[in-house]
Image (cartoon, helix red, strand yellow):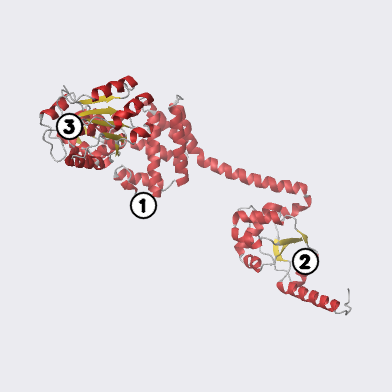
Amino acid sequence: MYRVLYRKYRPRVFADVIGQPQVTDTLRSEIRSGRLAHAYLFTGSRGTGKTTCSKILSKAVNCLSPRDGDPCGECEICRGIDDGSIMDVVEIDAASNNGVDDIRMLREEADFTPANAKYRVYIIDEVHMLSIGAFNALLKTLEEPPAHVIFILATTEVHKLPATIMSRCQRFDFHRISPQDIAARLEYVCEQENCTIDHEAALLIAGIADGAMRDSLSLLDQAMGQDQHITDELVRRTAGLADKSSIISICECILDKDPAGAIDLIDELHRSSKDMARLCEELVEHLRAMMLIKTMKQPDGVLVMSEDELRRTSGQASRMELSFIISSIDKLQGAYDRMLHGVNRRIEMEMTVVHLCSEGKSSDIQALTQKVEMLEGVLSRLVSDPSSLTAASSMKPASNPTLPKQKKPSTEEMDKLRENAVPMEQWPEIIEEIAKSSKALYTGFEGSRAYISGKFVLVDSDKDICFELLRKQQNREKMKAAIMKVTGRSYSLGRYSYPDEKKTDDALSQLANDLKAAGIPVSGQ
């Protein structure tokens, strides 16, 4: 009878377990030294070796002639455990034996000494499926079991276990197996089976399995049933994946804002019976690869793909903004969740891809909308103050507020402007607008005052830094842009007062006060 690959090539000793040295090295050391625990907890994702290590451990602790912490595999105990004739090693599926009565029966059996082996070993798989009552029934026995009993608990969802159970076990965490280790194991299996496999195909199987050796061997078994030479294309066809070029082509349509081309590709994949949820997953994986390429210096250490795929993906990543990649991943994951809740998968996929193709256009529309809103604000001010129509007609868009250079007024003209100046009530609002574009300008102008005189805004401040900032052309343009946005008019900038004027006014005021205090009449008082 044919034996499937994952059973045929299941490791017989700890040394054969792939990718779990943190577990196998510790267990072998404990067995060699005789420091065995009464309860072990194996946790990790599916297909990483939990059940395999449980069986190896059950043989190693009972083996008549262990070899460096590993079972010999040849003695009557090892052979009996393998063929199921030794009844002292019991495997329990907690998913179907999760009641209180099942655990009570286990407790009663545990009191009896082993019939053939040294230890009675209970392997409880998917232990998180036990009911609360079953956990409570197991608790006391797990804490103080008979000397001849060892419990091995295995679970993929350790967070569902009560803390009282976990605290009574030695915990071992099984990691996802690296794609390189899985690929090497698949190539070894193919060599033993007189079959050939391309390295890219082995890496693709490893990526699909997501760190699970059992899933990798099962997919390899399927592929070998079709051909004795395993290629990348054969693996994709067996797993129901879209061709990599199709994924890249869909991303090209997104980059080129071509929703019609993307819909055609999705239609072609749908007619060839490709699952839309799986296609969505593949697009997410491709975008994740682009995200890692844009954020990491050496992404090839994390990404599982050939050199040609890495080159093509890097080319697409260079044309796409990181923020757009992250946003696209988020939208596709939302679409995938909706697909799993029964909506039409094809429509959901088409709708999401069309949205991604149109996102750049939506951004352009948003920018135009903002400009329209700004112009509406300017128009509303013109309606309330029609006299400003002449001044407003010469304004330029806020994105390019540079105005023609004007002749600098003479000292006499500035004096006349100051005489006719009136306080500018909107100045505080202008200062708040400046804060949005320049914190330095906001700090420099904070506490200042301004006056309007004709086409001039005259700034008055006690801080010299205010006018030092205005000497730079770029700062003047920012100030003019803020004034334009708030008032809807374009103004030139000037100074309302100078330090010398203030000092003179202060000195004259002080002299007048001194003369008045001395009883000397002062003209004008």
The residue labelled by disc 2 is 418
Determine the secondary structure under disc 1: loop
In the image, 172 versus 255, the foreground residue is 172
Q: Nearer the viewer, residue 139 or 412?
A: 139
Residue 361 appears in the figure: yes
- Residue lying at 71% horizontally and 47% vertically, measured from the top left: 379
Residue 400 visible in the current orientation? no
Left or right of 484 on screen, residue 505: right
Q: Are marks 2 and 3 in contact (CB under 8 Å)?
A: no
Q: Which residue is mark 1?
A: 297
The image shows residue 498 at horizontal and vertical percentages of 72, 71
Q: Earlier in the sequence, mark 2 or mark 3?
A: 3
User: Mark 2 falls on what kind of element?
Assistant: helix
Point out the frontmost of discs 2 and 1. Answer: 1
Residue bearing the label numbered 3: 59
| Tally of marks | 3
